[in-house]
Amino acid sequence: RPDLFYKVDIAVIGAGQAGLSAAYHLRKSGIEPGKGFVVLDDEFGSGGAWQHRWDSLTLSNVNGINDLPGMAFADAVDTMDTSLQANLALPKYYEQYEKQFDLPVIRPVRVSEVTDRNGRFMIHTNGVQFTARGLINATGTWKTPNCPKYPGWDKFLGRQLHTGEYKGAQEFIGKHVIIVGGGISAIQLLGEISKVTTTTWVTRRPVDFKKEEFSIELRREAVASVEKRVREGLPPSSVVSVTGIHVTPAIEEMLLNGVLDRKPMFEEITENGVRWEDGTTIDADVIFWNTGFRHSLDHLAALHLLNDKGGIEMSGRLATQVSKDPRIHLIGYGPSASTIGANRAGGAAVKELIEFLKL
Ligand code: FAD
């Protein structure tokens, strides 16, 4: 029944970097917290996906955290202390940020489905139901790991896990670990695990290691190419697939000591390990899939945003607006899937949505 739905103008789904940036801009634009907009987040505490990252991800080995608008990261935590765990520092920052700007974050509220009824979005949750005229979706990727199922995956007697389940290298001591994936996480975690046990590294394609530091221009180009894809309605690719991997001193050491001697993707998983096309096998206790994440958008399925290319055609200044339905913005999506991108996208989405809804 529609009268059971709490009415707002704009609902933001997700309270990570992207959702909080949007909330800040909504407040700043004079949209009333509570009545005008709410932020729905399915976690018990602040921090978005950061609260789940592994302990060894510290301020010294993250790629760089961009400030949220209006309050610096360094105002909330001692960023000079690079040994700080990202899974503690970022949640602390976001918590203070939510308090400082009195943002109406409601949690834990899991949005299971959004439907469209008579020009309003009906937001179905495990708690209070909401209805809104505009939607800013900022649900990130962490809740939807991408884990390909290779033949025999269900026969393996050892342990299989995905990046999202990683707690630390110690649990692998004495085990042989096959690490799958060619992204930053795969390489960082291979570095950690190879220090305590034996490893085999497997990727689909050779990894493009780049000696030179990524310039701002290179990063811009990479983001621009992802933006071009989503404007054409293609599924977004990861920025790393465009830039390659920059060789840090840690990676240099791994290259020298053979940890990064890559093997191509195996053909099959067996009870005790994996088998390649030429019949070679390796026994393993663990297969660790660092095969990325996909955008968490399943709750929007009933809005039929996907096209036949498997993507969502985006438009607007920073490509946050869904072309098919300009009442919906996706932020932290495609070109804005980083702390800096998410930040900017929040501002652009709010401006365009307020204009479109004439608020
Ligand atoms: P999130 O932080 O994931 O927030 C989304 C929120 O929405 C979460 O709280 C989630 O629980 C909630 N949610 C999801 N689905 C629902 C639902 N159905 N209902 C209600 N709530 C929901 N970027 C950088 O700029 N620098 C880095 O150093 C960096 N390191 C990274 C390291 C790793 C291992 C990974 C995976 C990513 C990294 N990134 C980094 C990318 C970066 O984390 C994100 O792009 C950025 O934090 C944007 O966050 P977000 O708000 O889009 O998503």
Image (tube, rainbow, N blue to C red):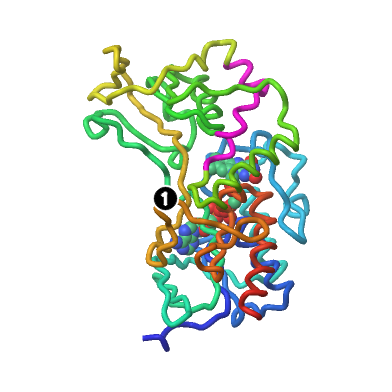
Residue at 67% x, 41% y is 84
Measuring from the top left, give residue 274's x and y in whole percent: 30, 21
Looking at the picture, tell me which residue is in the foreground, 193 or 38: 38
Up-down relation of residue 91 to residue 58 (above or below): below
Measuring from the top left, give residue 259's x and y in whole percent: 51, 16
Looking at the picture, tell me which residue is in the foreground, 131 or 57: 131
Left or right: residue 234 versus residue 147 is right
Res 55 quadrant in image: top right
Span highlighted in magenta in the image: 237-254
Residue at 39% x, 23% y is 178
Q: Amino acid at mark 1?
A: Gly
Question: Is 90 contained in the magenta span?
Answer: no
Local secondary structure at mark 1: loop
Pointer 1 residue = 310
Looking at the picture, tell me which residue is in the foreground, 278 or 309: 309
Residue at 53% x, 78% y is 133
Q: Residues within 10 Å of mark 1 (few under 14, many from 20)?
A: few
Residue at 45% x, 34% y is 290
Residue 218 visible from this viewpoint: yes
Residue 85 visible from this viewpoint: no
